[in-house]
Image (cartoon, rainbow, N blue to C red):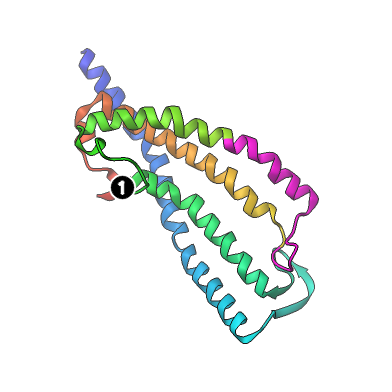
């Protein structure tokens, strides 16, 4: 009876982890398409620089993000806006597929259950607090940028608060996904059979 209870708890935890892990996988796959936009921005920058074009387009009224013109600085800054968002939000995909940088000298030799126990402690003690603390401490920078109307000083993009806001938002999203990993690992620790199964998102 006691064994059946902890197995049911493990199954419930595993089920509860799936929406969070699924959201991280989905976000990673969606944001991966941003790399195409980064390539286009890089190509525009290279072509404009080669042809000596400083200003590609200009319009009468101010447009969100681009203000009154699309310049070579706009294309340059667009690269790191897009690439920054790509790296920040796609990192959840790396977390769930174990493709992030980690030290595996001993880890890969451990049993699946022990690996989940290590992941559980790492996510609970290090990853989750780091994401929440940094997001909390950095948020005033986003508010200041928004309230001051911070823009590029070199004729580039406006609305600088967007790229600054991407950091805390991505960290909060990572924290939610860390909760998913914690639930998944805890389920695997309670039920070793779950630890042996291939992750559902790669089936």
Image-based side of 161 in relation to 171, left or right:
right
Which residue is located at x 44 percent, y 27 percent? 125
Image-based side of 91 in relation to 144, left or right:
left
Which residue is located at x 55 percent, y 34 percent? 132
- Most foreground residue, 139 or 73: 73
Image-based side of 21 in relation to 132, left or right:
left
Would residue 72 be seen by someone viewing this image from the given angle? yes
List the single residue furthest toward the bottom.
51
| Image quarter of residue 156 | bottom right
Inspect the magenta stretch and tell me whether residue 140 lies in it: yes
Residue on which disc 1 sits: 201
* Chain part drawn in magenta: 134-157
* Secondary structure mostly seen in the magenta stretch: helix
Q: Where is residue 130 in the image (x, y as percent from the top left)?
A: 51, 34
Q: Where is residue 194 in the image (x, y as percent from the top left)?
A: 23, 33
| Mark 1: few/some/many CA within 10 Å (<14, 14-19, 20+) | few
Please tell me whether mark 1 sits on a helix, a strand or a loop.
Answer: helix
Which residue is located at x 56 percent, y 78 percent? 46
- Most foreground residue, 42 or 35: 42
């Amino acid at each position: 009876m006691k064994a059946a209870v902890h197995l049911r708890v493990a199954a419930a935890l595993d089920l509860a982890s799936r929406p969070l892990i699924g959201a991280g996988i989905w976000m990673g796959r969606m944001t991966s398409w941003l790399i195409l936009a980064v390539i286009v921005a890089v190509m525009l920058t290279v072509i404009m620089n080669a042809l000596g074009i400083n200003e590609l387009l200009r319009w009468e009224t101010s447009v969100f993000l681009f203000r009154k013109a699309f310049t070579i600085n706009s294309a340059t800054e667009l690269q790191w806006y897009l690439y920054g968002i790509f790296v920040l939000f796609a990192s959840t995909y790396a977390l769930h597929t174990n493709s992030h940088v980690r030290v595996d000298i001993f880890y890969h030799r451990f049993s699946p259950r022990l690996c989940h126990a290590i992941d559980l402690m790492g996510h609970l003690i290090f990853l989750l607090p780091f994401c929440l603390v940094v997001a909390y401490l950095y948020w005033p920078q986003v508010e200041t940028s928004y309230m001051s109307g911070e823009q590029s000083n070199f004729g580039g993009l406006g609305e600088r608060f967007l790229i600054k806001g991407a950091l805390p938002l991505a960290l909060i999203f990572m924290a939610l996904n860390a909760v998913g990993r914690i639930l998944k690992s805890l389920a695997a620790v309670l039920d070793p059979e779950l630890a042996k199964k291939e992750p559902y998102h790669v089936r």
